[in-house]
Amino acid sequence: MNAVYRWVDHTAELELRVEAASEEEVFREALAALGELLRERSAGGAGEPARHALSTSAPDRATLLAEWLSELAFLAETRGFVPDRVESLSVEGQELDAVVTGVHAAPPHLVKAVTYHRLELREHDGGWHARVVLDV
Amino acid sequence: MSERRGRMTTLRPLDETLWEIPASERADMRVPARLFADRAILEAIGDDRSLEQLQNVATLPGIVDAAMAMPDIHQGYGFPVGGLAATEPPDGVVSPGGVGYDINCGVRLLVLPVSADELGARKETLVHEISRRAPSGAGRQGDLSLRGAELDRVLREGPRPLAERGIGTGDDIAHTESNGRLDGADPDAVSARAHERGSGQLGTVGSGNHFVEVQRVERVLDESAAGAYGLTAGLVTVLIHSGSRGLGHQVCTDHVKLMDAALDRHGIDLPDRQLACAPISSEEGRRYLGAMAAAANFAWANRHAIAHSVRESVRRVLGDAAADGTRQVYDVAHNVAKLERYEGRELCVHRKGATRAFPPGHTEIPSDYSDAGQPVFIPGSMGTSSFVLAGREGSMRRSFGTTCHGAGRRMSRTRARKQIEGRELRSRLEADGITVRCPSNKGLTEEAPFAYKDVESVVEVVERAGLAARVAQLRPIGVVKG
């Protein structure tokens, strides 16, 4: 199964859905989705190459996925970081450690926050499914 | 007469503008859910999840009377947008999701001593100058970069430290809800990450539905109240819509996480994690209220700084007399939780996309507006009219001193983008006499007028319900979007 993401229509917010073969792929694909969202709305040029290490933790994997996107949204707002690729990723127990690459550009302050509303990360039909609602 | 909704929810009319879902509808509802609306608005919300979300609010521990929503209700996360809940201390809860991420998002109205006719062709220059001086914040910070003790003083005191530096005036502060300062603000409850997000953002508008709009007073509907507010037909007004920016977003993020982790300890079971809450008297509840007050004060300082940028733009384009004569009508919050007294009880009133609307004679509104009532500003969608309202007595009896906050979205951003190209929307707005400054065509189309409900029907419902009354109609002539 190739990992795929899609944005679902929501009256006021953005709902991200991801399907992937593994839990780790869900995390990678969620980064790709956020990167694409920010890239298509960034003003100005391509930006300077950038690399960030990040770590976060949460009591369960669904919350850890929300925290992962929250970390990336924080970097976007405070450093102008538009993510492109996961260089390394470790998801073990309640901890996530990653190195991500992308560019420092001027993305809009689009994602106010990553919510817990209808948050989901579960295994079904031999694959993994995730749903995350962003406040924009 | 009752109406079955898409998810088999029973809505029964209590009168011509108020509808109720009884508490018996769901086992977990502690109180009824009530919605101010007419049939057209009920149709507009269709089968989205807003009524289900309103019922979820009715499950909150310590909620008083009813979970309520205004006619601009639409689906959000946790609370519906347009939602209202009053809870009673000490055991009643406070919910960060009941305020939202953009703490003290709100609107401020300025009136210039200049008519739209006198402004004439200089409008283009004025709109451009405002867009230059009040940046969105992406890629460019505001001119006020505050850190450490300076930032914490703003978190404690709101715009006052800015006025001491010649940014804005004491009269602006006197014409701001709560005088631009909530008591109990605790900068120590605001995380380092929230401080970092906010440090370069004072004076920035933000993106999404935030804007600065140049308008003309199109119509005065209540001469007496409009006179008190300094509004006469033809004058130029500027409406500022922004909030606490990244600082407030981070405060909400941090405290939803803390409260979510403490739900079991407090014995709270919720139908939606985004309603995460804690008793007002608990450590988590007190810390959140201190952090939220700090973010609310930051938001008032932010709109204060944007208003200063507008005044300086007026000075550059129209001269000193016009700038010095530019007066702040008022500033209202529409995402906040406040301790207020109703019938002798102190309650924590959560307003998420809803506006305080105190009636004439209330002690918490400026003395020069005592006869008119508290001003309320209802932005329309980009390209349509906005309204100035005045709070009415009915709000105290029926809605914890609250009315609506805007038109309310009816269409998703994706659907709005598919309806029209950015270039075409710009052309249409320009053809209607509205100068547009927006860096993103996508951002522009997402906020297209047709993506929102008809603001006039929303305002008509709250007027018929006795919550607020129309004072003036404002027509856009220029818009700056983040």
Image: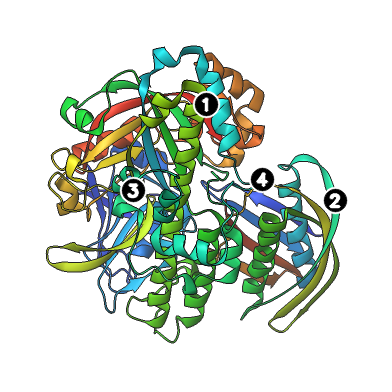
Give the residue type that dot 4 points to.
Answer: Arg
The answer to whether residue A6 is seen in the rendering is: yes
Residue B340, percent across and down?
Answer: 23, 62
Which residue position holds label 4?
A: B140
Which residue position holds label 3?
A: B173
Q: Is residue A35 left or right of residue B305?
A: right
Residue A73, percent across and down?
Answer: 67, 59
Which of pointers 1 and 3 indicates the residue nearer the eye? Answer: 1
Q: Secondary structure at mark 4?
A: loop
Chain identity of mark 3: B
Which of pointers 1 and 2 indicates the residue nearer the eye? Answer: 1
Residue A1, percent across and down?
Answer: 83, 62
Q: Is residue A57 above or below residue B390?
A: below
Outermost residue, bottom side: B265
Which residue position holds label 1?
A: B316
Chain identity of mark 4: B
Q: Earlier in the sequence, mark 4 or mark 1?
A: 4
